[in-house]
Image: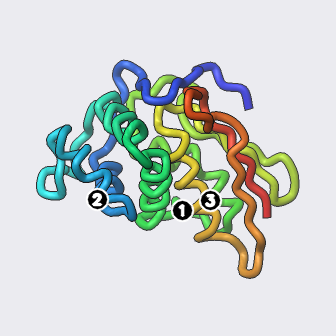
Amino acid sequence: MKTKYKAVQFRAPETAEVSGVILMAYLNNLEEKRVGPILKSYGFDKANIDTERWYPNQMFLDIERSIYQSEGGANALVAIGKSAVENYIPPAGVETLEDALMALPSVYTTNQRKLPEGYGWFIEKVGPQQFVFKNNTGTSNHGAYGYVWALCNKLKPAGANMSVVPTHGFSADDDEPAIIEIEW
């Protein structure tokens, strides 16, 4: 799972843009009371987020960094990632959890544009019902974890025991891309 581009958390590629749809998850999650004031400090609320507009990705990552640096910020970012899955519309042909995992790279780029090659979410199947996810983006590792965790729990086979374990990129001073091991 080698990539040419080496992302750093909270740092966007120069021309990258993000869809306003993504910002809606920041307003509708379990930590919205914590996140709302931070969004307002950047000039956003429910009334003025344009879901049809593209925003500079660095501004979006600055908001994430502010959330992360606030008290309980890592947990708030996990909640935001989980919230984003509530609006998950599977790409054509996605019927199983494995399909959904393998589609993660294209799901990420649906709401992002002007990205360099090698920037994004990557997934590798390493065994039967075993996958390794890599967040090679500037997007918060905690938010990516929340998204992957919620997606796995939403689509897991009935009665399956899920394991979604962050293995790299989650220490307080770590700005490296996240690696998450998934198994059921």
Left-right relation of 34 to 37:
right
Q: Secondary structure at mark 2?
A: helix
Q: Which residue is most to the left?
A: 47
Residue on which disc 1 sits: 92
Q: CA distance from mark 1 to mark 3?
A: 10 Å
Mark 2 in CB contact with mark 3 (< 8 angstroms): no
Chain-order first, disc 1 or disc 2: 2
Residue drawn at the location 18% of the way across and 57% of the way down: 46
Looking at the image, is 174 positioned above or below residue 163? above
Residue drawn at the location 76% of the way across and 80% of the way down: 159
**Nearer the observer, disc 2 or disc 3?**
2
Residue drawn at the location 62% of the way across and 68% of the way down: 153
Residue on which disc 2 sits: 33
Q: CA distance from mark 1 to mark 2?
A: 35 Å
**Nearer the observer, disc 1 or disc 3?**
3
Out of 43 and 76, give the one closest to the viewer: 76
Out of 94 and 7, give the one closest to the viewer: 7
Residue 70 image position (x, y, % from top left): 37, 41
Q: Report the amino acid beneath label 3.
A: Ala
Residue on which disc 3 sits: 100
Looking at the image, is 113 positioned above or below residue 145? above
Residue 137 appears in the figure = yes
